[in-house]
Amino acid sequence: MDPVDQSASSRWGLPVFPSAHLDGTAIGLRRQGGLGLMALMRSESLKFLETLLNTPSPSGYETRGQRVWLDYVAQFADETFSDAYGNAVAVLNKGGKPRLMLAGHADEIAMTVNYIDSDGFIFVRQVGGVDPAIIKAQRVTIHTRNGPVKGVVGNVPPHLLKLEKERKLPEMHDLFIDIGVSSRKEAQKLVAIGDPVTLNAQFERLRNDLAIARAFDNRIGTFAVAEALRLLAKSRAKLRAEVCAVSNILEEVGLFGARQIAYSLKPDAALIVDVTHATDYPTVNKTMHGDVKVGRGPTLTRGGPNHPVLVERLVQVAKKHDIPLQFEAISNTSGTDTDAIFWTRGGIPSALISLPNRYMHSPVELVSLKDLDYIPQLMAAFALSLKADEQFKVKI
C-alpha cells in the first residue's frame, strides 16, 4: 500500500532542481568491504543521493522527496507504504524476527511566509534551526499551490550602513524576500501565508570524496537506510530479521515523525542515521565539542538514549568488517530522532550512527562521501549478524 499523493506534491510546487554535473562514474573508493562488496558508491546510488538532495523537502512538506525515496527503494523491498502524515517505509524479509528499524529523517530546515507588507515584500518565520545571519542575500524558492516562485532575501549594502555605530546580527523577523512585485495585492496573487521557502543551493562535488549541499542534514540518513536495504536484498538468504527502512518526517521541528512511525512499527531495535558536527575546522572548540573529523569514518555515540548493548554490537561488527569509526559522548539527549524512538512504547533499544558534517544548517554543508558509504555497509552487516528472535537487553 502506498498512499503518497503525487498530485499533492505537484499542488505545492516542490520541484526537483536540475542536476549538478556528474560524470556518471562511481566514486573511486576501491576497498574490499567485509560484506564481500566493493566499498564503491555506484553511479546509480550517487545519482539517487543527488536527486534526494536537490528535491526540496521542508518540514511538513516532504511529499516530493518521499516519492523519490519510495520509487528507489521499491526495487529492493517486499513492500512499501506510507502513513497518514507521510512517513515512508520499505520492508524486507517481512515476517522475520527480530524486527529492525533503520531510520533517517527526510525533512530539512526552511522558512515559511508569515507577512506581506504594503510594498509586496515578504517576511518569514523559521522552520527548524535556521540561522538568520546566513540567510541574507540568498536566492530562494517559495513553494506555492500554483508552483514555485523565485525570490531573493534582501540585504542592505555596507555603504548604507556606515552611519550605524554597531552592526547587529539580523533576527528572523528582520529578513524579507523580494519577489519582484510592487504591492501586497500583486504578491498575494503569487504566494500565500504559510507557503514554505527553501534556499536554492544544490549538490556539488568539491574535491575528491568531499561534497557540499543544502540538505545533507538529513538526506544522507534516508539515503543510507535505502542503500542498506539494497545491500541486504543481495544477501536476503542470510537475513533472519525483518528490516524496515524508514524515511520519516518532521524531525527538524520536534522529532514528531520518528515517534509516529516507531509507535506503529513497534520494532525490536532501531538504528538511526543523522549528521553530526565535525569539529576539524578553525574556531571550533574541541574541548567543548569533541574531536570529530571529516574523512575518518562515521561516528557512534555513547550515553543518553543509545543502548549500550546495541552500541557494542555495532563496534564489533565494524571491527569485523574493517569499517572505521569515531566516537562521541553525550550526557543527556542527542538532538536526533534517537531521543524520540528510544522512549516509544516500553523503550525501543536504539543507537545513533552519524556522518561528520562541517557547517551544519547552512547552504554549504560539507561531508565525505567515503564516510557516507560506510554507513549502509555497517547497518547491513549489523542486520546480517542478527540471530533469529534475538533481543537486546541490558544485563543486571
Image (tube, rainbow, N blue to C red):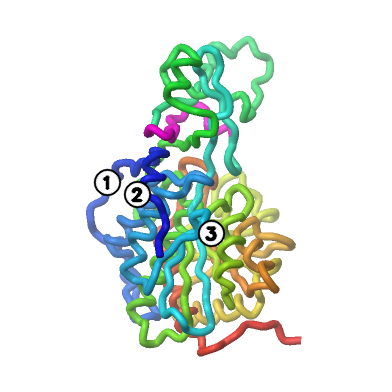
Amino acid, disc 2: Arg
Residue 9 at x, y percent in the picture: 40, 45
Asked if the residue at tag 2 contacts the one at tag 3, i.e. Cβ–Cβ closer than 8 Å, the answer is: no
* CB-based contact (under 8 Å), mark 2 and mark 1: yes
Q: Of circles 3 and 1, which is in front?
A: 3
Residue 222 location, x and y as percent?
45, 60
Task: Say what amino acid the circle numbered 1 marks.
Answer: His
> Gap in Å between the C-alphas at discs 3 and 1?
26 Å
Question: Disc 3 versus disc 2: distance between alpha carbons?
Answer: 20 Å
Looking at the picture, tell me which residue is in the foreground, 363 or 392: 392
Q: Give the residue displayed 57% in from the left and 57% down from the top.
A: 257
The residue mark sitting in front, 2 or 1, is 1
- Give the mark nearer the N terminus: 3 vs 1: 1
Query: Residue placed at 37% from the left, 42% from the top?
Result: 10
Q: Is residue 150 above or below residue 7?
A: above
Residue type at mark 3?
A: Asp
Residue 205 badge: 2
Look at mark 3 in the image and give the residue it sits on.
274
In the picture, which quadrant includes the N terminus?
bottom left
Label 1 Cα crowd, 10 Å radius (few <14 / some 14-19 / many 20+): few
Mark seen at residue 70? none
Q: Can the viewer see residue 264?
A: yes
Identify the residue at the far right of this view.
396
Does 259 appear in magenta? no
Which region shows up in magenta?
132-147
| Residue annotated with mark 1 | 21
Task: Identify whether 76 is placed above or below 159.
Answer: below
Instruction: Say which of 292 and 303 sits in front.
Output: 303
Q: Is residue 146 above or below residue 35?
A: above
In depth, the one of 367 and 106 nearer the eye is 106
